[in-house]
Image (cartoon, helix red, strand yellow):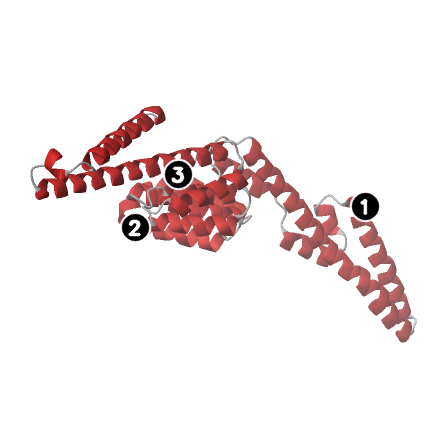
Amino acid sequence: MNSLNKYLLISLLFIEISFAQIFNSYPSALLKNSHSELVSESKTEKKMLKQVQLDIQHIDLEEQFEFAVRLFDEENYFDAITEFKRLQFFDTSNVYKFASNELIALCYKYGGKFNEAIKYLTLAAITANSKDDLYRIRIEIIRVNILRRTTDNALKLLDEIGNDEPWGEKKDEINYWRGWSYIFADEWDKASQMFARISLTHELKILCDSTDEKKYSPTFAKVASVILPGAGQFYTGKYLSGFISFGWCALWGYTAVNAFVGDRIFDGLAVTNFLWLRFYQGNLQNAEKFVGEKNIQITNEALYFLQHNYLGLKP
């Protein structure tokens, strides 16, 4: 029933009640035959009036909900939150409580307020109307945890869902979000294992394998730099830095050895401690630093691809 029809119905009810009240003001002998009939008529009128009031309230709440949803669809999330909260204040029968809590949470999520989103998703889970609604809300909580990089929380919730009998058949979806949890934790090898449980040819498995292969090993870079100063920088493509590290370490190493050979022990210790050791430690630190920078760049490229080119579900 559209809004116009509802308002017409309510108007007719008000007219009927008004006429009933007018006629009720005449002497009872002219209109009714007994006191019991008067009492019965009065109760009926009160029920009708109460029903009209409820209908008016329902129409107002429905319009308020539709208005808030329209703001949400227009991506006007701040105003949508305000209108959903206004709806909750007047919705004393909690008709829209679940839907409004869910949509408030999504507004906060899209606005980057992940803690607030978790709060309202939890409230929505408490008032879920069905198992399907509850499952959807729990998955949404997991997706928000993935976005805010609370990986342990996300994996714990996924394990809980996986162990629940009603949702045992949703293993592929659970593994899918496990994979995304590891992606945001920068553990691409583990993410690949999760997607492989769905399919060995899964698009995200292939991406994770490719990203993991591109990444540099900080352990290898440091060990190489320990053996040969500058090797770690060469490994990450920082050739100039590698040459400089090798050159300074070679120069001050040669100077220190000459000092020891010439019985200039003090000079040898001074050169070793204040010059050679300084550049040798810098060589190790640079190797680790450059590996970290390269890996961040590789990770960001993969995440950029997922954000702009991947067409599947994303957190």
Q: Is residue 1 visible?
A: no
The type of residue carrying mark 3 is Ile
Residue at disc 3, secondary structure: helix
Where is mark 1, residue-wise?
240
Towards the viewer: 169 or 11: 11
The type of residue carrying mark 1 is Leu
The spot of residue 258 in percent (x, y) is 90, 66
Cα–Cα gap, marks 2 and 3 = 19 Å
> Going 74% across and 54% down the picture, which residue do you hit?
286
Q: Nearer the viewer, mark 2 or mark 3?
A: 2
Binning the other alpha carbons within 10 Å of mark 3 as few (below 14), some (14 to 19) or many (20 upward) gives some
Q: Which mark is residue 164?
A: 2
Horizontal arrangement in the rendering, residue 20 relative to residue 206 (left or right):
left
Towards the viewer: 305 or 112: 112
Above or below, 263 relative to 309: below
Cα–Cα gap, marks 3 and 1 = 45 Å
Where is mark 3, residue-wise?
198
Towards the viewer: 288 or 303: 303
Cα–Cα gap, marks 1 and 2 = 57 Å
